[in-house]
Structures are given as C-alpha cells and as structure tokens.
Image: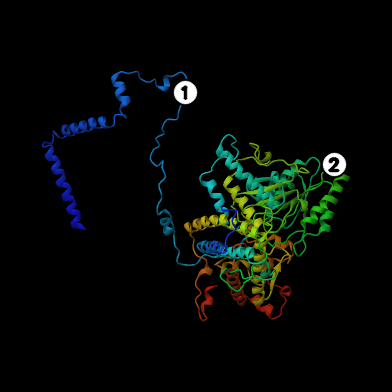
C-alpha cells in the first residue's frame, strides 16, 4: 500500500465506483442490495462532512433510491478496525479509511465471484412488476 | 467439409504408400526400421554424450559408484534434481474464469421465496465465506499439531477467531470454548455445572420460555434427582425479578435465563439478574455455609450475540452460549463462554484428548472457526448499522400490516429485539396462513418444533390461548432483508389474511359483535 500519501478525490471516487460495480455483480438479490447499500453508506458516512449528516434521518434501505441524500449516521466507521487508534486529523481519517477500503474491496470482489459461480434462482421480488388490472389476486390463496 | 476429409485421407494413404516403397517387402519392414533407429541413436550419442556418460563409463569398466543401499550410512550431500511429473508447473488457466462464469446456471424465472426466518438461521455472509475458503483448500492442518507448519497456521487462525469472538462479548480469549453449537453449549453449561456441584447444591432455576435444549437438559437433570424451578413469565415475556429473588435458594447452583428469546424477541433484564445473583445469591450461599460460591449465571445468547451489545463482565454473566449460524456464520460451530475469575468449574460432557482446556475434547474445525471469527468481527463492526436497518424494517412491517388489518396482536415486549416480530392474526389458522404464503419463508415458532402442529409453548407461557397461539407467525428480519421484501410480504399477508377471514364463519360472528368465548359449541 502507498501508505504515506493521502488519496486524491479522484482516487476515492474510482474506488467508490469499483465498490458499486462489484456490489452490483453479486447474483443473489439480498447480497447485491446489501453491499450496494453498505458501500454507499460507508463512503458517505466516512467522507461526507459531518454537518450534512443528520442523526434522525431515516434513509431508505433500497440502494437504488436516491431520495436520501444524507448518510446514515448510525453506520460505524465501517472499515476502520477498533484496534487502530482513532485518527487525529480528517486527512488521517480519510487516508486510513481509503487503505482499509482498498483491502476490503478485494474480499468483496472474490465474494462476488464465488456468488456468481453458484448462482441460484431469482427471488420473487426480482420479478419485473406487471401491471395487472384486477383479477390476479385469486392465485394467492 | 466432406470433400476435404476425403482428400486428407487420400494424402495420408499416399504417404504410407511412399513409406512402403522405401522398405519394399513386408518382411523386411522391421529390419529396415531397426537400422533406422540405430543410426539415430549413434547420432544422438555424438551430439549429446553427457546423458550417456554414466552408461559409457560402466561399459568401459571405470570405478562404479556404490549404490546408496549398500552404504553403511547414507549421507545425502545435496538435493538431487527433483524431476516432478506431469502437472508440476502451473498452467495459466486462460479463459478459465470466463468459462466458469458463463457456464454457471442461469435461471429465467423468479420463483424463489423470500426468506424471513432469521431466527432459525441466517445466510453465510459472503465475506465470511471468503475467510473460510483457504482452510477448505490449502490450509488443512490440524490446529493441534504442534510439530509442523500446517498445524501452526491453523492454530493461528483459530486463536485469532477466538479473540474476535471474545471481543464481541467483552471476554478474554481464554474463556471461549468452541463447541458444535448453542445446543451443545447449553447442555454443557447446565449439566456440567450442576453435576460438578452436585454434592453441595442441587437446585437449578430457568424460565418457561427457554429454548428446548435448556428445558430438556433441565428435565434430564430432574430425572437424576435435581430440583428445577421453571420461572413463569409476564404477559410481555419478561421474567418478574421478585419471583426470581423468591426462587433463589442456598442450594441453587445455576440460573439459566436466555438473553433474547428466539420466538418473541424479548430481551430479559440480564444485567439486573447478574446483579441479583451477585448480591442476594451470594448471600444465600454464604448463609448456608456451603463453600461460598454464588449461583452461576448462564445465559443462552445465541439470538443476542451480534444483535445487541453484550458485555459479560458488566452483566455479571458466568457462562454464555453462542452460535455461529445466527450471526451470518457457518452452521455446525458455536462457542461457550466460561468465566475464569472467579472460576466456574464444570464436568466436561465430552472426554478425550484434552483440547479446549479439557472441557471439550475433539479436533477443532479451522474453516468453521475462522468463519465464526470473521462473522463475529463483522457483527461487532456492523452492530449499530444493522440494528438501525432492522429496526426500520420491523417498524415498516408492523405499520404496513396494522394499517390494513385489524385484530393483530403483537406478542412480546415492545422494547425487545426488533429483528424478531411475533404477530398473531386472530381468527386465522397459522398453518393455513403459512400454506397460502408459498413465496415467503416464515415460521410459526421455533424451527425445532415446526414439525409438530402443537401451539408454541412460549406463546402459551405468555398467556395466549390455544386459538391465538395457533394464529401466530414469527417474522425474522436480518442484515440482508430489504424494504422491497418487507413491502412484498406485508402486501401478501394482508391479502391472504383478508381472504381467509372472509371465508371464516368465526370472523363473521366477530364482525357481528358476538363474543366467541360465550358460544357453547355442540359436540
């Protein structure tokens, strides 16, 4: 790892994009949505400035929803393991976060690959919604 | 295509004709070939005489090397060139990845049901699997092998995992014993402690809403002559502290109360119980003058670990059962926390090679333990994040359902663990509700008892009558549950419950204002 140099804005954005691409490549619906949500919240809660995050904001859990612009405050400094001392400056914090995130991306990529290899059937919620005008209810019971 | 193949065979046959022309008669063919090979041999001798040096040396009668077998002390000076066989060098595996991914089965239809049963088990987190795989492929050493590298690397990972699990519950790594799961941990704790202190103490306290394995262990001990108090619970599922205090005796050796209930999600006042045992319990034991040790506090935290914050020291817990597959780890592994100071002594259930401080012999499973450790690490890291997500979904589920249908009872303490929602849909048969909900995986209670049609004993202990206990469903929400799933499920539930109620004559009577309990049914 290039430890001493703080990551540039561009590097962080590239990493973020890599996270999203990897998360989207999971074949299991639940894992895919979780890792998308997680990646988004992780980057936002760690990198978006404190002032913009509101503790009472109830963000939508769907990773696709753009409605919540705010980061979920409850998310821990996800990738920063507690064994390391709390970083002093913001720059330090970002640097530490970046390094951890780069390492964890590898885990995520391997996980996505394994998940793809053993793809399962799709969940019922993944079905594209058909607009049916009345009548189909009887199938349920 | 056909024409070309014919042509190629024609060419081949013409070649063979040419060869036969060189050696005209069939009988002379072999001689002809042998002379040819002889000439090639001589040429290679000239060109590459190194390889045949030893052969020629022997032929010429020089001093021949002594064969190693006839030497008195075979001393190997240098490693000989190891000529590895076929496959010793790794190929590039070009396009392997693409072919694997493209040949993975593709499913066109989307029929797999939604999983909402996080209390029975949870999916293995992909990050956990990633941690496990090295131990299922290359690193297969026995962690108890102290003589070689394969053993050391396995042992190292086991100890790292132990550390992570200890951290999750605020314990020391030495206090964690790996078992096969929470059931074994529960058996081991209750039976082990009770048996060890048998000569002085013979009383056990537990609650009526415990998991089957605790209740059954207690029943077994009862048969052996122990006295067991099964504490009742209040209508919200919590125990009454005054009742626990009254139940304590000088002879109480162990109190076993679960942290989070697996069916209704109530969180028992663990800290208060721990405190009570330290004060009142210790006092009683001292009064009896029976060697002073206070009643030990065991808690089954299989449903709690990684879901709510736990600290064994703060909560005064002496023994704790943990399970890996309830916190997104692999199945088949669990752990038991056993306090070292003051020391909890117990009889082991399984005797053998003395692994795990002699309390649980048997070779450990490094892949499972590594997975459990990673799951514990993730659970600690994601605890607040997951809890917020799960609370939000639970609230959404409750609101969705109660907004559309009436006569829904929410079982258990409202401040319980939100990932476990137990709802009663009155005047609807639970099993027929489950049958109608084909594309949702739900349970009407614990998985262990889901095969029987008996109503849940946990719900009965809350004071629910048979009919209501039969109409209850448990919704288990986990880390990977999404809002879309919750919306889908609540929509389904609403439509099915409405439909079933429309068919029910009981529901009709309720709508007309008839109190069902006043009806005298003719036999």
Between label 2 and label 1, give the one nearer the viewer: 1
Chain where mark 2 sits: B
Q: Is residue B116 visible?
A: no
Q: What residue is shown with label 2?
A: B290
Q: Residue B10, how many percent across, how many down? A: 16, 50
- Residue appearing at x 22%, y 33% in the figure: B40
The image quadrant that residue B478 belongs to is bottom right
Dot 2 crowding, Cα within 10 Å, few <14, some 14–19, many 20+: some
The residue under the point 65% across, 78% down is B508
Quarter of the image that includes the N terminus of chain B: bottom left
Q: Is residue B272 above or below residue B347?
A: below
- Same subunit: marks 2 and 1: yes
Side of B27 relative to B239 (left or right): left
Left or right relative to B150: residue B523: right
For numbered disc 2, what is the local secondary structure?
loop
Q: Where is residue B231 in the image (x, y as percent from the top left)?
A: 78, 56
Q: In this view, does A90 lie to the left or right of B49?
A: right
Q: Is A55 or B517 nearer to us in this picture? A: A55
Residue B86 makes an appearance in the image: yes
The residue lying toward the viewer, choosing from B495 and B452, is B495
Label disc, if present, on residue B50 of the rendered structure: none
Residue B34 position, x and y percent, is 19, 32
Q: Say above or below: B278 vs B155.
A: below
Reading the image, the residue beneath label 1 is: B75
Q: Residues within 10 Å of mark 1 (few under 14, many from 20)?
A: few
């Amino acid at each position: 790892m290039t430890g001493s140099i703080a990551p540039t804005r561009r590097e962080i954005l590239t990493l973020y994009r890599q996270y999203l691409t990897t998360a989207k490549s999971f074949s299991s619906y639940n894992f895919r949505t979780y890792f998308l949500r997680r990646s988004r919240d992780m980057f936002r809660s760690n990198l978006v400035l404190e002032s913009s995050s509101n503790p009472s904001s109830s963000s939508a859990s769907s990773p696709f929803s753009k409605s919540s612009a705010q980061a979920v405050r409850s998310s821990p400094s996800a990738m920063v393991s507690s064994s390391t001392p709390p970083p002093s400056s913001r720059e330090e914090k970002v640097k530490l976060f970046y390094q951890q995130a780069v390492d964890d991306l590898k885990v995520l990529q391997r996980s996505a690959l394994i998940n793809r290899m053993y793809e399962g059937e799709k969940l019922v919620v993944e079905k594209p919604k058909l607009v049916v005008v009345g009548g189909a209810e009887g199938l349920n019971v | 295509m056909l024409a070309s193949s014919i042509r190629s065979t024609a060419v081949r046959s013409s070649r063979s004709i040419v060869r036969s022309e060189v050696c005209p008669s069939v009988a002379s063919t072999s001689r002809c070939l042998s002379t040819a090979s002889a000439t090639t041999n001589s040429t290679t001798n000239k060109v590459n005489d190194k390889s045949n040096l030893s052969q020629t040396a022997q032929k010429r009668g020089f001093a021949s090397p002594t064969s190693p077998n006839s030497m008195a002390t075979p001393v190997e000076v240098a490693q000989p060139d190891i000529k590895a066989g076929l496959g010793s060098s790794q190929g590039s595996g070009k396009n392997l990845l693409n072919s694997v991914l493209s040949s993975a089965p593709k499913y066109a239809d989307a029929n797999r049901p939604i999983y909402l049963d996080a209390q029975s088990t949870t999916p293995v987190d992909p990050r956990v699997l990633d941690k496990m795989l090295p131990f299922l492929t290359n690193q297969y050493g026995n962690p108890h092998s102290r003589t070689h590298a394969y053993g050391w690397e396995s042992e190292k990972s086991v100890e790292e995992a132990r550390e992570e699990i200890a951290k999750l519950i605020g314990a020391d790594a030495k206090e964690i014993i790996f078992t096969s799961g929470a059931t074994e941990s529960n058996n081991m704790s209750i039976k082990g402690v009770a048996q060890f202190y048998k000569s002085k103490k013979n009383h056990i306290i537990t609650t009526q809403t415990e998991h089957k394995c605790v209740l059954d262990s207690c029943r077994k001990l009862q048969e052996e002559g122990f006295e067991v108090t099964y504490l009742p619970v209040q209508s919200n599922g919590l125990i009454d502290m005054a009742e626990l205090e009254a139940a304590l005796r000088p002879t109480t050796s162990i109190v076993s109360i679960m942290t989070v209930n697996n069916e209704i999600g109530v969180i028992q006042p663990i800290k208060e119980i721990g405190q009570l045992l330290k004060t009142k319990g210790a006092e009683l034991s001292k009064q009896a003058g029976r060697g002073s040790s206070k009643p030990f506090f065991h808690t089954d935290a299989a449903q709690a670990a990684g879901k709510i914050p736990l600290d064994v020291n703060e909560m005064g817990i002496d023994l704790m059962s943990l399970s890996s597959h309830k916190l997104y780890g692999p199945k088949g592994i669990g752990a038991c926390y056993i306090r070292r100071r003051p020391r909890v002594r117990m009889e082991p259930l399984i005797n053998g090679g003395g692994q795990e401080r002699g309390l649980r012999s048997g070779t450990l499973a490094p892949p499972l333990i590594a997975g459990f450790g990673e799951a514990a690490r993730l659970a600690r890291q994601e605890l607040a994040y997951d809890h917020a997500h799960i609370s939000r979904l639970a609230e959404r589920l409750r609101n969705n359902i109660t907004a559309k249908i009436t006569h829904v009872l929410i079982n258990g303490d409202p401040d319980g663990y939100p990932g476990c929602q137990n709802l009663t849909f009155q005047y609807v048969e639970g099993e027929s509700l489950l049958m109608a909900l084909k594309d949702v995986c739900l349970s009407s209670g614990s998985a262990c008892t889901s095969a029987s049609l008996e109503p849940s004993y946990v719900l009965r202990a809350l004071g629910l009558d048979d009919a209501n206990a039969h109409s209850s469903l448990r919704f288990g929400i986990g880390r990977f549950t999404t809002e879309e799933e919750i919306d889908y499920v609540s929509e389904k539930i609403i439509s099915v419950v409405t439909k079933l109620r429309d068919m029910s004559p009981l529901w009709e009577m309720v709508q007309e204002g008839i109190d069902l309990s006043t009806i005298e049914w003719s036999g």
